[in-house]
Image (spheres, rainbow, N blue to C red):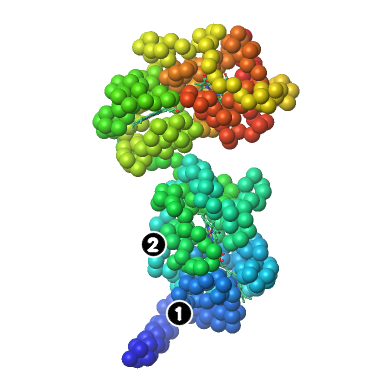
């Protein structure tokens, strides 16, 4: 029976080939393609199949000579595949694929450019993996914040223990399995997503690892891998999406009542029923000039929660609950409703405290080894200017100016919403008593239980430049 079926198919194949050949139109390109196909088949048979398998069930690395190419039509980006086959790509297995046989690293055989193209075409036709859903992972929707989460998850889930990546120009991690340094050029992300759902469907009993990650975490890790080795990756900016263009203040108002007022209060005065147990207190939205805040920050704090911007985890991440349209709507409501800077704002405890000099100060003291540090950079115009740029524009997750204000007196768009208020850098009476090392420590670590978030992405040099700028404000 079996045999009969197969030979029928063979018969059909011959019929198709005959039909194509006899069709006069496009005969030339078609037959060229057919020639490429048979060239690819011949190459596979004579030059690849001695090491790689192209069919069969997934098997242990310890039974194989080389990675399986059963799903080669779905796994790679074409340009990487051509590069690999023509010997232009970086090695994948630093210790050799079969490290147990102490083969060590060997150079992969190469083929000509045209043979590589023929193979890539053939893989795309013959070795597509049906389990991989096309469009399962959309690389054009990867945000900068997701990549940051992915970086964290990549480390938290031990990936770094077995796969190397590049960070700050250095290769880090364990070179046990495939190098992920060029992952953003190498993988078709739909394949990677399917692989991540269960690696054992591809590489069982090989030392591979299934992480206990939710789908959003898996997506974040893949987003992180999608930028590895890719210069000038174009990040998606969700606040430019159609959900934001279609945002509705009315819908946002209802969402605010349902999901935000329990902590931030019905009128945004930070006095909802949940606040009695919260430290830090929820921001007083009524005092925030929402219009003046960068959209990136607002989006991140609402969609990804306080943790995403170094703030308290008691500010929940709302994206899963209210969806992208909900996030867009509630932000539209915040912007339309809360403008800060009013007399009412000044009358709240937070409003009354900002700009005061000398300023009451209960900030935790830095450990003594930090307190003893002096600014190693000269107070040159160059360093002060560099500090100013970070303060006004570039510091992430949020430029200092948004809380500490244009003048540094604490009157930024969020300043009046925070208890305690931001430090008033213009107040020499308070600032002169604070050593450089204390300022350095707080910028790096934040002031726990207050609105002052940590800035882990700043280099030491940048923090010292900022401190020169802060010192230049005191009068
Ligand atoms: C002598 C054995 C050998 C031959 C012959 C060989 N390969 Fe490989 N190939 C390997 C090994 C081993 C690796 C794993 C990476 C490494 O150690 O270089 C690999 C890696 C690859 C990869 C990347 C696999 C992955 O990790 O996703 C592709 C694609 C590939 N080979 C295609 C081919 C093709 C196509 C041919 C035939 C033209 C071929 N190879 C011939 C041994 C071989
Ligand atoms: C204990 C070691 C180990 C850990 C931890 C680990 N992996 Fe792997 N990984 C492997 C092995 C082994 C394979 C199978 C391929 C092979 O034979 O090297 C693999 C395969 C992969 C592949 C496919 C490689 C290819 O080109 O075929 C990717 C991508 C990958 N892992 C990503 C991850 C991510 C992301 C994490 C963290 C969630 C992770 N790995 C954690 C060992 C590990
Ligand atoms: C469980 C209590 C809680 C709920 C519910 C809550 N928040 Fe918050 N929110 C907080 C806390 C606490 C902070 C302050 C975090 C900090 O300063 O570390 C905060 C801060 C914020 C900030 C940041 C202001 C700043 O200081 O930079 C925004 C914006 C915000 N919340 C918006 C919302 C929106 C919109 C909702 C409803 C969709 C919401 N919050 C629901 C507790 C909550
Ligand atoms: C989201 C609001 C916010 C942002 C953004 C912010 N700060 Fe603050 N900052 C505060 C608050 C609130 C305090 C008061 C904390 C306290 O009283 O302990 C503060 C305090 C400080 C202090 C005082 C430390 C001390 O020991 O007295 C320094 C220094 C400081 N911030 C520097 C910065 C710098 C530099 C940036 C930008 C890289 C920045 N802040 C961004 C809110 C903010």
Dot 2 lies on which element? loop
Q: Callout 1: few (<14), some (14-19), or many (20+) C-alpha neighbours within 10 Å?
A: few
Quadrant of the image containing the C terminus: top right
What numbered label is drawn on residue 27? Answer: 1
Is 377 drawn above or below residue 61 in the view shown?
A: above
- How far across and down, in percent of the image, does residue 326 sit? 31, 37
Task: Single out the mark in the foreground, 1 or 2.
Answer: 2
Dot 1 lies on which element? helix
Quadrant of the image containing the N terminus: bottom left
Q: Callout 2: few (<14), some (14-19), or many (20+) C-alpha neighbours within 10 Å?
A: few
- How far across and down, in percent of the image, does residue 433 sit? 63, 13
- How far across and down, in percent of the image, does residue 110 sit? 64, 72
Identified at 70% across, 23% down, the residue is 372
- The residue beneath circle 2 is 133
Image quadrant assignment for residue 428: top right
- How far across and down, in percent of the image, does residue 280 sit? 43, 25
Alpha carbons under labels 1 and 2: distance apart: 33 Å
The verdict on label 1 being within 8 Å of ligand 1 is no
State the residue in front, 112 or 97.
97
Identified at 53% across, 16% down, the residue is 362
């Amino acid at each position: 029976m079996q045999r009969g079926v197969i030979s029928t198919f063979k018969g059909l194949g011959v019929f198709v080939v005959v039909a194509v050949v006899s069709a006069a139109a496009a005969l030339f390109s078609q037959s060229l393609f057919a020639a490429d196909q048979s060239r690819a088949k011949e190459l596979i048979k004579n030059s690849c199949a001695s090491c790689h398998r192209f069919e069969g069930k997934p098997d242990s690395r310890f039974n194989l000579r080389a990675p399986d190419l059963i799903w080669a039509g779905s796994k790679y980006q074409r340009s990487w595949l051509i590069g690999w086959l023509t010997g232009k790509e970086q090695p994948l297995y630093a210790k050799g694929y079969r490290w147990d046989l102490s083969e060590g690293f060997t150079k992969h055989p190469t083929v000509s450019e045209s043979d590589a193209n023929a193979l890539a075409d053939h893989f795309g036709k013959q070795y597509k993996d049906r389990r991989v859903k096309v469009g399962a992972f959309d690389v054009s929707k990867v945000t900068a914040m997701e990549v940051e989460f992915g970086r964290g998850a990549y480390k938290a889930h031990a990936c770094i223990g077995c796969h190397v990546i590049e960070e700050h120009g250095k290769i880090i991690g364990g070179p046990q399995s495939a190098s992920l340094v060029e992952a953003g050029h190498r993988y078709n992300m739909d394949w990677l997503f399917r692989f991540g759902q269960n690696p054992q469907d591809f590489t069982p009993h090989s030392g591979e690892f299934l992480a206990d990650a939710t789908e959003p975490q898996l997506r974040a890790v893949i987003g992180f891998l999608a930028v590895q080795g890719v210069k000038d990756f174009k990040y998606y900016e969700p606040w430019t999406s159609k959900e934001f263009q279609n945002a509705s203040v009315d819908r946002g108002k209802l969402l605010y009542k349902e999901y935000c007022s329990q902590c931030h209060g019905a009128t945004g005065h930070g006095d909802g029923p949940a606040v009695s147990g919260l430290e830090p207190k929820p921001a007083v939205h009524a005092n925030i000039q929402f219009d003046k805040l960068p959209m990136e920050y607002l989006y991140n704090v609402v969609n990804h929660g306080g943790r995403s911007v170094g703030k308290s985890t008691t500010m929940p991440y709302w994206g899963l609950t209210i969806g992208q349209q909900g996030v867009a709507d509630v932000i539209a409501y915040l912007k339309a409703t809360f403008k800060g800077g009013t007399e009412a704002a000044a009358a709240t405890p937070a409003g009354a405290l900002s700009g005061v000099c000398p300023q009451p100060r209960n900030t935790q003291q830095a450990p003594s080894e930090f307190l003893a540090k002096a600014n190693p950079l000269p107070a040159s115009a160059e360093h002060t200017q560099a500090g100013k740029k970070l303060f006004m524009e570039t510091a992430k997750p949020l430029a200092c100016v948004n809380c500490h204000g244009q003048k540094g007196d604490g009157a930024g768009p969020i300043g009046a919403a925070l208890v305690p208020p931001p430090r008033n850098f213009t107040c020499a009476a308070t600032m002169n008593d604070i050593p450089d090392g204390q300022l350095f420590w707080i910028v790096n670590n934040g002031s726990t239980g207050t609105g002052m978030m940590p800035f882990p992405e700043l280099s030491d040099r940048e923090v010292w430049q900022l401190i020169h700028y802060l010192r230049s404000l005191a009068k």
